[in-house]
Amino acid sequence: MKVYNLICEHDHRFEGWFSSEDDFKAQSDAMLIACPVCENHSVRKLPSAPRLNLSGAQASKSDVEQAQKQLLDIVRKIVANTEDVGERFAEEARRIHYNEAPERAIRGVASVKEFEALSDEGIDVLPFPVSDALKSPLQ
Ligand SMILES: [Zn+2]
């Protein structure tokens, strides 16, 4: 099912529901679509605005805020359950990988080069936007 924003000759805007683009064209060509306000049959399709929400409902500001809050909660959880090794991240990740340090979840900073080197050695590291997320004020 497709929902199109339609407009008649007299600038009345309304929504039309069609099973497909072809269905819309067929009905439009056959003059089967009428404006609900003035019953004008010269109806054309307005370009539809992209919608974020897959349910078809427009995402409201509170939806976006909710999503940001959830992301922040996840980030905080990760931060709470990992040890911050800062600049020693690459070194520490390597030590854990080669059993030279106790196995645990760590976080820290690594350059792109270090990151690639770790990946090459088969060490699983995940780029994580923790600093960005934590820039938001707490509470
Ligand atoms: Zn109209």
Image: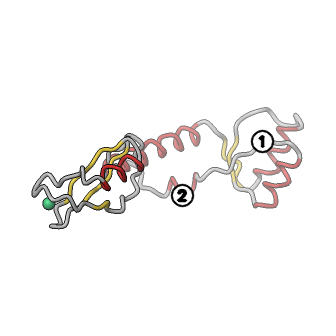
Question: Hey, what amino acid is under mark 2?
Answer: Asp
Q: Quadrant of ligand 1?
A: bottom left
Q: Is residue 31 left or right of residue 130?
A: left
Q: Hey, which quadrant is residue 43 in on the image?
A: bottom left
Element at badge 2?
helix
Residue to which mark 2 is pinned: 132
Q: Residues within 10 Å of mark 2 (few under 14, many from 20)?
A: few
Image x and y of residue 35, in percent = 17, 55
Q: Nearer the viewer, residue 107 or 2?
A: 2
Image x and y of residue 48, in percent = 36, 58
Please, which residue is most extreme toward the front here?
Answer: 30
At x 29%, y 55%, the residue is 5
Q: CA distance from mark 2 to mark 1?
A: 22 Å
Which numbered dot is residue 22?
A: none
Q: Hey, which quadrant is residue 37 in on the image?
A: bottom left
At x 20%, y 58%, the residue is 41
Q: Is residue 84 left or right of residue 30?
A: right
Image x and y of residue 122, in percent = 86, 42
Q: Nearer the viewer, residue 72 or 91?
A: 72
Q: Hey, which quadrant is residue 49 in on the image?
A: bottom left
At x 47%, y 41%, the residue is 73
Which numbered dot is residue 124?
A: 1
